[in-house]
Amino acid sequence: MRRTRGTGVLGVVALLALTACSTAVQGTPVGKGPSGPVPPGLEKFYAQSVKWGDCADYATDEVSSSLYDDADLRCARLRVPLDYAKPDGREITIGLLRKQSAKGADRIGSLVVNPGGPGQSGMSSAAQLAEEWDDPLAARFDLVGFDPRGVGSSQPAVKCLTDQAKDTDRLTPPVAGTGPEAVAAVEKENKEYVDQCVANTGADVLANIGTRDVVKDMDVLRSVLGDQKLNYLGFSYGTRIGTAYAEAFPGNVRAMVLDGAVDPGADRVASAIGQANGFRKAFAAFAASCAKDGVCPVGTDAAQAEAKLDALLDPLKTKPADGGDRQLSYSDAVTAVLQCLYSEELWDTLEKSLDDLVKGDGEVLMRLADLYLGRGEDGRYSNIHDAFTAVRCVDDPPVKDRAVVEEQTRRIREGLPKSALDDEEDFVAALDECAFWPVPNTSQPHEPKTTGLPQVMVISSTGDPATPYESGVKLAKALSAVLLTVEANSHTAFLGDNKCVNDAGAAYLIELKLPAEGTKCS
């Protein structure tokens, strides 16, 4: 993740989301005409055939290269218009990955998944899920992942900084102070970053990269897969895609599971404060668990854990630690800590990595930061965080009024006590990248209108740091959905180790049987 100077809580913490079917043989074109309704002028896209073949050529980094080396996975490219207002204009391609179900009479169709981000590869996510894609879902659904436009294998991909520039950026110390000089320095860097995005990607692509257009691509995908109705599973930001699809195409939904919900009506500041407090709550839970061991790198008094973390990480601002063959910076260490707070399954890893740092060894933290930032051992980065910025800036209205930025910064300062989880450069009242974005936003937070949508399922965890539980409550209310509460410290829960959640989700996807209102899993 690129350090978003001056936007901290608004940036770095936020970075931390079928009935008729084809029976074609793998490796041959599929598509027998459009399935379901077709918007005027888009017939050639809805009726197109795609050719499924080997996935090796679709890999874009070390992770996907490893995941796509599986003969049971097949990949293809979907053609869509860059600008849906100009369907006869420039075309782009969307990368697809599929693991087919057994072609039995019980097959329902395809289950399309998105892992969130924005900017994460849906193809890689589906390939990971495919490794343990078991009954009952595997017998009933093809598992399908797609890289949203601009992401991963989709072409063209968003590109801003070079790999070398990203490495350099990660080692850049935090901006000192919060005065006019700090503001000017942050804004200069943000504008230079935007200029690189435009130069390396193109303003026409950046103008059409947002959620508004992703959901249109997803409806083309539904038709090309041969599904009259969409079955969809969205995690984190993927719930925003699902919500937008439900609003644009409510009659085209069969089933939809939205896990780790984004509040569709929340403004940027409310989201930032809610998310930062979610990570603070998760850190407090980690610290309490760690303290029980009697020996803990952030102390055995959980009330003092944040201060201990500050003391441990603050020296990295001026002197990076040994990170193996590279240097561990302050921003890398914060990123690694946040990465481990997404799930209590990573708490042991966090305890070990901080204990190593006490001894001067930052290699585990460096590897965690690399994993989160999409950097392979070969030094190549995925484009997840360039894509994140591009989508964020076109999805939400920019803030260009400095008085508003100063007020937002004041609200965040008052809403959050200072700690390593929100370092001081988070409080520089500077315009962020989106203020310099060259194209207008195409979406904005709002209460969705989904008349005609069948009842869908929202899953929210009580200890979710990234998309706090209340966001799930609000999304379920907005969609008139059934909310499944998960009592756990984790960001998302479905298809993990919780049998209660997995059984409820499978019953809904297969039988359209929703859990009773108020159902909880622990």
Image: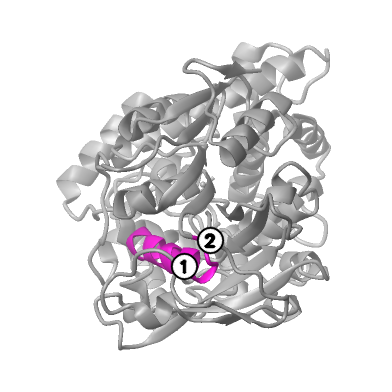
Residue at 57%, 73% (x, y): give it. 95
Q: Is residue 338 left or right of residue 291?
A: left
Task: Give the residue pinned by disc 2.
Answer: 20
Residue at 53%, 67% (x, y): give it. 226
| The C terminus lies in quadrant | top right
User: Magenta stretch containing residue 134, yes or no?
Assistant: no
Query: Measured from the top left, where is residue 235 in percent x and y?
Result: 54, 44
Q: CA distance from mark 1 to mark 2?
A: 9 Å
Q: Is residue 230 left or right of residue 130?
A: left
Residue at 52%, 40% (x, y): give it. 257
Is residue 176 something that shows in the picture? no
Relative to 80, say whether 274 is above or below. above
Task: Give the residue pinned by disc 1.
Answer: 223
Say which of 228 and 353 sits in front. Answer: 228
Is residue 228 something that shows in the picture? yes
**Nearest to viewer (mark 1 / mark 2):** 2
Q: What amino acid is labelled 1 in the image?
A: Ser
Query: Measured from the top left, where is residue 455 in percent x and y?
Result: 41, 34
Report the span colored magenta. 210-227
Relative to 512, say whether 299 is above or below. above
